[in-house]
């Protein structure tokens, strides 16, 4: 079993965590023979609910789970972490401006970034899920200057998986037959799901998605908007936001960081844009295609970008630059 891996999940009394914790604890993310310590953080009013979650984890009688720690204190939660999965954030309430949402979250992620800096291992891998995820992630990273920027990522894997499954559904395949879709940019409705470089496997042959689908207007229209607005569609139908699929995407994202990406495949992750070759400004937390090896990611280089893609990639970069500006104004006063 070796040394246990110490994993924090914030927003641990919430509904994404409820789907996520079981998957982590039973070995879906760090492997079937890796012992774990799970640390669960939430706000003080949620501690009663969190006790119930702890009871349930105990009642799962899982062999890998060495210890479960539930807390509302950052100095306890962030101590000696190997992995931090920051799910908790201030959700958008009806009639709330995006600006107000940013302001509330800057406060949370400033504080958690400082806690990472002060208490976590310098090798900690930090994954931000709570929205606005890209800017929250950048905020936390800025507050933890002694942790490498590359150790911070935000979740766009849910969008990536949504794009994969839309292509699979269109072609009557399974998601496994589709690879190398890309989500560029912000985890918002300006994200750009790009299948120009994606491949599908049909009867053992690899074919480009455009060639396989043979419906360019769908690929440039409804496909993109379906993926961009899928989160809202789920909320409309379920009256709750995506939890099962979000938890699955977090597992995929963290497992790929831990074990690497399969040969010949890349995945989408929000990462620091410094040194990218796609004309995206530095110092943004932007979703790119990456490959991962030995727990570190690299940009997928040299993909040709057409005019259609260029425009969409720049649009989402512009939104991220504006979000960053707003957030950093709040940072100085927060």
Image (tube, grey):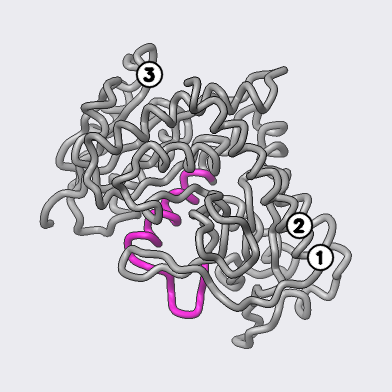
Point 54% across, 60% down: residue: 268
Instruction: Tell me which corner region of the image, top left, top right, bottom left or bottom right, holds residue 196.
Output: bottom right
Residue 34 placed where, x, y %? 20, 55
Left of 37 or right of it: where is 145? right
**In the displayed structure, does residue 80 sit left or right of residue 149?**
left
Q: Secondary structure beneath disc 1?
A: helix
Q: Position of residue 48 (x, y in %)?
A: 33, 14
Q: Where in the figure is residue 287, as x and y percent of width and height?
A: 57, 55
Decide: is 180 above or below 43. below
Relative depth, front residue between 252 and 97: 97
Q: Kindly identify the residue that appears in the image at 42 percent across and 65 percent down.
A: 297
Graded by Cα atoms within 10 Å as few (under 14), some (14 to 19) or many (20 or more), the crowding at tag 3 reads some
Residue segment shown in magenta: 246-266
Which residue is drawn at the image coordinates 54% and 46% (left, top)? 245
| Residue position marked by numbered label 3 in the rendering | 43
Return the residue at label 2.
Answer: 312
Which residue occupies 33% across, 32% down? 114
Say if mark 1 contacts mark 2, CB within 8 Å: yes
Quadrant where the N terminus lies? Answer: bottom left
Q: Which residue corresponds to mark 1? A: 308
Q: Is residue 202 magenta?
A: no
**Residue 327 x/y as whole percent:** 56, 32
Tag in front: 3 or 2: 2
CA distance separating discs 3 and 1: 44 Å
Residue extending farthest right: 217
> Disc 3 vs disc 1: Cβ atoms closer than 8 Å?
no
Whichever of callouts 3 and 2 sits on the residue coming sooner in the sequence is: 3
Whole-angstrom CA distance, mark 1 to mark 2, is 7 Å
């Amino acid at each position: 079993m070796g040394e246990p891996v110490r994993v924090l999940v914030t927003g641990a009394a919430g509904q994404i965590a409820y789907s996520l914790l079981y998957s982590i604890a039973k070995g879906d993310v760090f492997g079937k023979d890796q012992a774990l310590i799970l640390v669960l953080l939430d706000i003080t009013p949620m501690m009663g609910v969190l006790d119930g979650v702890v009871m349930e984890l105990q009642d799962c009688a899982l062999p890998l789970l060495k210890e479960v720690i539930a807390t509302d204190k950052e100095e306890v939660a962030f101590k000696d972490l190997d992995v931090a999965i920051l799910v908790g954030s201030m959700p958008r309430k009806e009639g709330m401006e995006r600006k107000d949402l940013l302001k509330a979250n800057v406060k949370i992620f400033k504080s958690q970034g400082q806690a990472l800096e002060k208490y976590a291992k310098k090798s900690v891998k930090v994954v931000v899920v709570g929205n606005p995820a890209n800017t929250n992630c950048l905020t936390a990273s800025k507050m933890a200057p002694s942790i490498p920027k590359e150790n911070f990522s935000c979740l766009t894997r849910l969008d990536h998986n949504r794009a994969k499954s839309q292509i699979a559904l269109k072609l009557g395949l399974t998601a496994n037959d589709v690879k190398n879709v890309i989500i560029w940019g912000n985890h918002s409705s300006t994200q750009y799901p790009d299948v120009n470089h994606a491949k599908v496997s049909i009867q053992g042959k690899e074919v480009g998605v455009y060639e396989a689908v043979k419906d360019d207007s769908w690929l440039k229209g409804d496909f993109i908007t379906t993926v961009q607005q899928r989160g809202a569609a789920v909320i409309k139908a379920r009256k709750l936001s995506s939890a099962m699929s979000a938890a699955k995407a977090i597992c995929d994202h963290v497992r790929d960081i831990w074990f690497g990406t399969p040969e010949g495949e890349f995945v989408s992750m929000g990462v620091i844009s410094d040194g990218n070759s796609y004309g995206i400004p530095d110092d943004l937390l932007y979703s790119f295609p990456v490959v991962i090896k030995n727990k570190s990611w690299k940009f997928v280089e040299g993909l040709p970008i057409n005019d259609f893609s260029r425009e969409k990639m720049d649009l989402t970069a512009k939104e991220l630059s504006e979000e960053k500006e707003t957030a950093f104004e709040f940072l100085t006063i927060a």
